[in-house]
Amino acid sequence: MELGTVIGNVWATRKEDELQGLKFLIVQPEHADRTNAGVPFVAVDRIGAGFGDQVLVTRGSAAANLSSSEKKIPIDALIIGIIDSVDVEKEVK
Amino acid sequence: MELGTVIGNVWATRKEDELQGLKFLIVQPEHADRTNAGVPFVAVDRIGAGFGDQVLVTRGSAAANLSSSEKKIPIDALIIGIIDSVDVEKEVK
Amino acid sequence: MELGTVIGNVWATRKEDELQGLKFLIVQPEHADRTNAGVPFVAVDRIGAGFGDQVLVTRGSAAANLSSSEKKIPIDALIIGIIDSVDVEKEVK
Amino acid sequence: MELGTVIGNVWATRKEDELQGLKFLIVQPEHADRTNAGVPFVAVDRIGAGFGDQVLVTRGSAAANLSSSEKKIPIDALIIGIIDSVDVEKEVK
Amino acid sequence: MELGTVIGNVWATRKEDELQGLKFLIVQPEHADRTNAGVPFVAVDRIGAGFGDQVLVTRGSAAANLSSSEKKIPIDALIIGIIDSVDVEKEVK
């Protein structure tokens, strides 16, 4: 999983049917000290993350392993947690 | 998911059987401000995207999680939405 | 999916059982204008691609979504089409 | 799989329901000689890894192939082993 | 798939239960001419590869598509063949 901060959102009226109602947020990936660590991407949020929240994101097809549905949907990034704190003894960039 | 713009298409008569009838578009990945963010790739489109549209794309095997079929097909990129607007408070490249 | 050209093949007598009989080709990934776009890799071909053909390749675990078998096999790249033509309005490298 | 060392942990009270109770550690990816090999990431640990342990990590959706559950969960990195020793005849960085 | 050479192995007594008995080898990814092509990684071997063998490796979750088990295990790299020969007409690095 990657750490990041929510920096925006995306609106798309026309989309694949099974994605109606999902919230799409833009996440800036970050190091543990919250400096930038790569290119922003779009992730689905189901736990109420908002602008400026530090989040934990699962990327790749595992993002589609949603608890509430039997049917997998075509998403490749999911916000799985809102970070309370990060403890690092050594951080390398 | 990644943001991008449709810049072309690909024609292939001879292909894996289960891919007949699908539309293959070339997508230029972009940052939120629509500057380029990497190498163009080919994505399947089922929602009617066209040249110049800003789109949201799922990459990797989750792209094969199509609502209309039980059988998964061998595709690794799917246009899942046509973007209406993108709001970003902070954008880092 | 990625565009590329078939530049070679790989022979391996000793392999995982379920891969017997498959053809393994080396693909040079390319931009739409056929200039190089990265490191060559090995892909399975089931549609008769040969040396010099421009092909469309699915990478990652979706390559194992083969129509002819219920059982997924351990392959991570599949040639899904032989390109007739590519139309690009804008190409960025 | 990748080699790495556990350098920290992440706390997130609010998260996707099925992730309650899991331990999230920060892993610094490393070469065989334990020099750094990339950006730290967050991995789930179920085998008792701790600060400073050298670990073997599976990344991507295969990390969700957990033995104890039928239902796959949305995680993309799992510590699968705590390293006793690494033998390398040739190491290239 | 990627080409590479076996350069070492990894020992881990404490690991996820379903991985007991598997052999973990370190693979140096290589170009077709056997020059280095990236950072070494750890792959599972079930076909008897040894030090110095040139091998074909599947990476990502498709590595878990093992013929002998119904249950997928958390591995992300599998040696699928031991190379007899590689023929390349054009090789670009």
Image (cartoon, coloured by chain):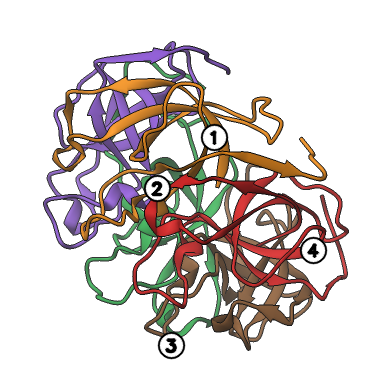
Chain colours: A red, B orange, C purple, D brown, E green
Circle 3 residue:
D68
Residue at the image point whose x is 20% and y is 21% from the top: C50
Question: What chain does badge 1 belong to?
Answer: E
Q: CA distance from mark 1 to mark 2?
A: 19 Å
Q: Are marks 1 and 2 on the same chain?
A: no
Give amino acid for label 4.
Answer: Asp
Instruction: Give left or right: position of C76 versus C14.
Output: right
Q: CA distance from mark 4 to mark 3?
A: 32 Å
Tag 3, which secondary structure?
loop
Q: CA distance from mark 3 to mark 2?
A: 26 Å
Mark nearest the camera among 1 and 4 is 4
Q: Are marks 3 and 2 on the same chain?
A: no
Residue at the image point whose x is 82% and y is 49% from the top: A93
Q: Tell me whether circle 4 and circle 2 mark residues in contact (CB < 8 Å).
A: no
Tag 4, which secondary structure?
loop
Q: Are marks 1 and 4 on the same chain?
A: no
Q: B87 or B28: nearer the eye?
A: B87
